[in-house]
Amino acid sequence: MKIRSVLTAVIEANYDWTLVRVITDEGVEGVGECFCAPGLTATIRDLSVLVEGEDARNVEAITRKLRLATAHAASGGGTVHHAISGIEAALWDLNARALGVPLWRLFGGKFRDRVRIYADCHAGEALESYSSVLVSRTPSWASLDPDEAQEVHWAPAEREGVYTPESYAQRAKQMVGRGFTALKFDLDLPLLPDEDLHARTISPRQLERQVSLADAACEAAGPDVEVAFDCHWRYAPSDALKLAQALEYLPVLWLEDPTPPEDVDALGWVTSGTSTRIATGENQYLLHGFTRMIESGAVNVVAPDVQKVGGLAETRRIAALADTRYLPMAPHNIAGPVGTMASVHVCASIPNFLALEWHAASVPFFDELVTGHARALIRDGWIEVPDAPGIGVELDLEACRRYARRGEPFFE
């Protein structure tokens, strides 16, 4: 079963959802998804020459070949790993389809029949869209008419009244009403007028504001719902610890990315000084990027991003290491339905799973892009682990083309 071609398409949603299709000479196909990055589809095209003609059944060997060939350019992570992750995921989907089994069967079976989803709520109700370098944009498919844009709820999140306790409480109630038992909100935004973006400090006034936001979200969510909070690597260790300790009276699911990702010691210092659980991992690559963090006890919740960390198998290796230290896994996920469903199979196959992120609550076409599911993929805050071959869903190519990014190839 030789690989004939590797093709890409980009869906312009809240982020770029870059899809990879691997097609064999026997007509069997698989689809995967990559985390967004500058020059991603060009990188995938460059890598495709290394896999064309290879036996698609040798997923691990092909992945190792790609890593070795790009070691000079990807030692610290980045776009190449994003590209390899998408290709690897497509190969796993392809192999499961060729065998007529759900993907979780290839991972040794499943521990659960459904996967808990946590909704990333940001704040307020606005739907944001960002380019691969996080520049705010209006998607090419969205109307440029402000009145019509409001009809699809596409508006800048920085508008007045979004980052308030009232807005957080309202959003929490909305998502709880949709059945979610776990939520996440931002705590590092916006900066107060007199704050310095580069200083990594939290002023007393900002700390008071952050605690009020967290308090409002937790109270509105109620006693049966857990709420996490994200800091986007914003703070110095002493200030991050101050925030974590200030939140200890609340039933916080975790405090995410409180310090810069490159310093494991700083993260460990924060983790050891608070009873608030600390989560991180989305900016780490491969098992090696997690080893010291896990083994030193620098983190309470391990959160790799499946679409960038190096692939589905690599995510399972990270989970296995975390399990030796009794640490739960809560994968980061800003993907569309393809990446989300691939992550579901990984989450079903590991014992130490906590929750999987869903970042697309406001994307109006999330469920349109795939078929093969009777209703919405996420129902009452959970995704049922499918028994259909591969990842369990099929691309709706017409819908994908409707929301595709202009100027990018569409599986060509």
Image (spheres, grey):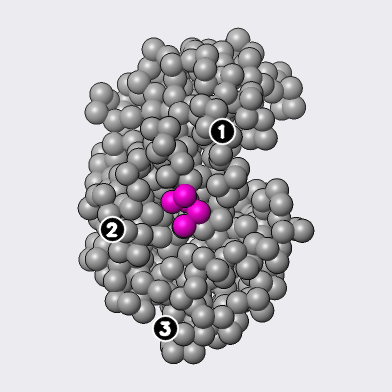
In the image, is residue 248 above or below residue 303?
above
Left or right relative to 318: residue 40: right
In the image, is residue 326 above or below residue 39?
above
Residues shaded magenta: 313-317
Q: Quadrant of residue 71?
A: bottom right
Q: Three-letter amino acid code at disc 3?
A: Val
Residue 186 visible in the current orientation: no
Q: Residues within 10 Å of mark 1 (few under 14, many from 20)?
A: many
Q: Residues within 10 Å of mark 2 (few under 14, many from 20)?
A: some
Q: Residue at x 32, y 25 (%)?
A: 220
Question: What residue did someone put label 2 on?
Answer: 109
Residue 281 placed where, x, y %? 54, 40
Work out how far the residue at label 2 is from the one at label 1, CA to CA, in angstroms.
Answer: 28 Å
Q: Three-letter amino acid code at disc 1?
A: Met
Say if mark 3 contacts mark 1, CB within 8 Å.
no
Question: Where residue 132 is drawn, which disc sits there?
Answer: none
Residue 312 placed where, x, y %? 46, 57
Residue 134 visible in the current orientation: yes
Q: Residue at x 39, y 23 (%)?
A: 252
Q: Three-letter amino acid code at disc 2?
A: Gly
- Front-lying residue, 184 or 339: 339
Question: What residue did someone put label 3 on?
Answer: 28
Q: Of the residues tagged 3 and 1, which is closer to the observer?
A: 1
Question: What residue did someone put label 1 on?
Answer: 293
Residue 268 placed where, x, y %? 57, 23
- Front-lying residue, 136 or 234: 234
Q: Quadrant of residue 178?
A: top left
* Between discs 2 and 1, the one toward the N terminus: 2
